[in-house]
Image (cartoon, rainbow, N blue to C red):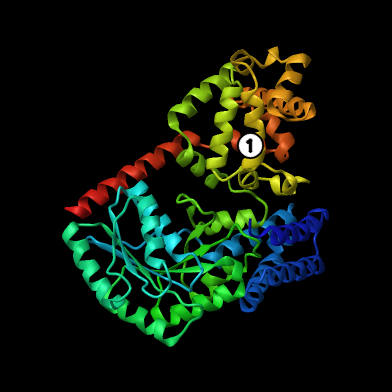
Amino acid sequence: MAFEGLTERLQNAMSKLRRKGKISETDVREAMREIRLALLEADVNFGVVKDFVKTVRERAIGSEVLESLTPAQQIVKIVDEELTKVMGEEATALNKSPHIPTIIMMVGLQGAGKTTTAGKLAYRLKENDQARPLFIAADVYRPAAIEQLQVVAQQVGAPVFELGTDVDPREIVRQGLAQAVENKNDYVIIDTAGRLQIDEKLMQELADIKELAQPSEILLTVDAMTGQNAVNVAESFNQQLDITGVVLTKLDGDTRGGAALSIRAVTGKPIKFTGQGEKLTDLDVFHPDRMADRILGMGDMLTLIEKAQTDYDEEKANKLAEKMQENTFDFNDFIDQLDQVQKMGGIQDILKMMPGMNNVPGLDQIQMGPKETGHMKAVVSSMTPAERTDPDLLNPSRRRRIAAGAGRPIQEVNRMIKQFKESRKMMSKMSNGNFDGMDQMFGQGMSGKLGKMAMGSMVRKQKKDKQKRLKQARKRRK
């Protein structure tokens, strides 16, 4: 995940302040120096860093902070608020046309993930709005670009309009739009050509397509791994095309995260989505406030809850809740849980969204990929049906048999059974409203916060929002 180095540096700066009861202006200036270096090392734009540090310092040395009972916490709050402000305050929705189709023009350099992002966006629109998107294949230059779009479109279940590679992209867009009107598609996603670098010919072609299509959205896809260069690309495209938003891809790669912190401040245009991973579901709405929390190691419980609600089978969830309350959670449920965790992006990503987990030593050493999951499944598969439903049957001789059957060391089998029993105990407590065990994991006070989270109202709100979106989609089609 991006920002790990930045998160560590910022947390170190904040922990130094926390260790002091009273904080002086000198302490604040020292912390600001560390924050400035951390941001620059994360490849954040120099001008953005300069303005950010100046604003935070001015707010932090105010009397209401230095003379408060919790000055360190006040400064963390200021840093959090200013990070959020730099990245755009709040999530920005897609622009929609009052009449169908809404036209979305995808632009960007080659290799940024534009075609894959177009597929993810179409999938999202189909899932959330019951939309009927049409792709227009306007990249006639890159070898196999049309074939790649067709493969992605097939996965999404959406049609592609294409005229091959010998027709001018402008004509392809013109005819594609006519087909979208005829077929009453709600959305048109134009996959335009990229280049290895920005050039005049590329920009002129894109300007012509913009003039012709009059898109509601011009989404620039940029590769977060290119750091400051991503910001330069965004600035150039914005000057030429007046983009409406940015999709930041590869945010899960080995990146320092500077692009996410700089793009909004430099271009004035919002980051609308982030892409993390290769699956069609791996496109998330960009929430500046949640990203700021994650950068400061404060977790992102809202995104975690939303991911769980999206990816989790509701019927299975209800059955699991009952089993947790009755303390009858067994190894069959455990395997189901493993599969759900993998769907949500893996255990490491989930843990990092939990408050306080960034501070847990050895978190980066946790391995729970397909290989480790396969080992666990092999252990459970070597159990008899009775052993899976009643783990108390697992005496030493049975454990040796299971280890031999799974081809895993006996120590690994013992460890897994022990962890399973501890987890079952914790889940039983939590499902009955007892969050005390969470304090040991995440620090004092966390249990209260989790206990008070209005989960029910959040679920109801999401269902209500979805019904509203479906109603609007049906209205726009008429």
How many numbered marks are there?
Answer: 1
Q: Nearer the viewer, residue 403 or 52?
A: 403
Residue type (three-letter) at the residue carrying disc 1: Thr
Q: Position of residue 240 (x, y in %)?
A: 41, 82
Q: Where is residue 204 in the image (x, y as percent from the top left)?
A: 37, 84
x 57%, y 66%: residue? 224
Name the quadrant containing residue 80.
Answer: bottom right
x 58%, y 57%: residue? 291
- Locate the N terminus and report the quarter of the image it occupies: bottom right
Against 130, residue 31 (above or below) is below
Q: Is mark 1 on a helix, strand or loop?
A: helix
For residue 458, say whether it is visible: yes
Residue 171 vs residue 38: left or right? left
Against 262, residue 22 (above or below) is above
x 30%, y 70%: residue? 164
x 40%, y 42%: residue? 462
For residue 432, say whether it is visible: no
Residue 133 vs residue 16: left or right? left
Name the quadrant containing residue 258.
Answer: bottom right
Q: Estimate how packed mark 1 is, as few (under 14), some (14 to 19) or many (20 or more) residues with alpha carbons within 10 Å.
A: some
Q: Nearer the viewer, residue 72 or 37?
A: 37
Q: Which of 87 and 378 is in front in this view?
A: 378
Against 343, residue 423 (above or below) is above
Residue 457 vs residue 421: left or right? left
Q: Where is residue 260 in the image (x, y as percent from the top left)?
A: 57, 66
Q: Where is residue 109 in the image (x, y as percent from the top left)?
A: 48, 74
Read off the residue under disc 1.
373
Against 133, residue 259 (above or below) is below
